[in-house]
Image: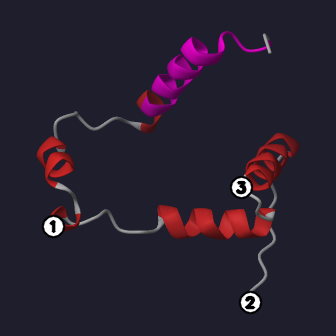
């Protein structure tokens, strides 16, 4: 196995530890899995079910900023304002 040393801020490390713990994984295993997932090519059409295949392309692509805004809006609706919980 290769060794990788990265520098992240304390908040990012805490989130990584929390997510890894929730999945019964070490942070190292979580990061390795994350790299595996984000580097996989998208599934080919024939690998998708018929309903999923029929929905492909229905939504317009979103920029990273649009995705972040949508996720934040969802979190606000689900969990309320930051600092309430």
- Most foreground residue, 61 or 28: 28
What's the CA distance linking mark 3 and mark 2?
22 Å
Q: Which mark is residue 8?
A: none
| 71 is within the stretch colored magenta | yes
Q: Residues within 10 Å of mark 3 (few under 14, many from 20)?
A: few
Q: Is 76 situated left or right of 53 in this image?
A: right
Which residue shows up at 49% across the image and 23% down it? 69
Q: Position of residue 57 (x, y in %)?
A: 17, 42
- Most foreground residue, 51 or 4: 51
Q: Is 78 situated left or right of 61 in this image?
A: right
Q: Is 67 situated left or right of 10 in this image?
A: left
The first of marks 3 and 1 along the sequence is 3
- Span of residues in magenta: 67-83
Q: Position of residue 51 (x, y in %)?
A: 16, 46
What's the CA distance linking mark 3 and mark 1?
31 Å
Q: Which mark is residue 46?
A: 1
Q: Position of residue 81 (x, y in %)?
A: 68, 10
Query: In what element is the residue under mark 1?
Result: helix
| 75 is within the stretch colored magenta | yes
Query: In what element is the residue under mark 3?
Result: loop
Instruction: List the residue tagged with mark 3.
Output: 23
Which residue shows up at 58% across the image and 67% down it? 35
Instruction: List the residue tagged with mark 2.
Output: 1
């Amino acid at each position: 196995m290769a060794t990788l040393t990265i520098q992240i801020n304390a908040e990012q490390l805490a989130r990584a530890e929390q997510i890894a713990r929730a999945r019964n994984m070490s942070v190292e295993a979580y990061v390795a899995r994350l790299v595996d997932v984000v580097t996989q090519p998208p599934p080919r059409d024939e690998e998708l079910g018929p309903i999923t295949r029929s929905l492909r392309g229905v939504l317009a692509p979103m920029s990273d900023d649009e995705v972040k805004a949508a996720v934040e809006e969802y979190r606000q609706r689900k969990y309320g304002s930051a600092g309430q919980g």
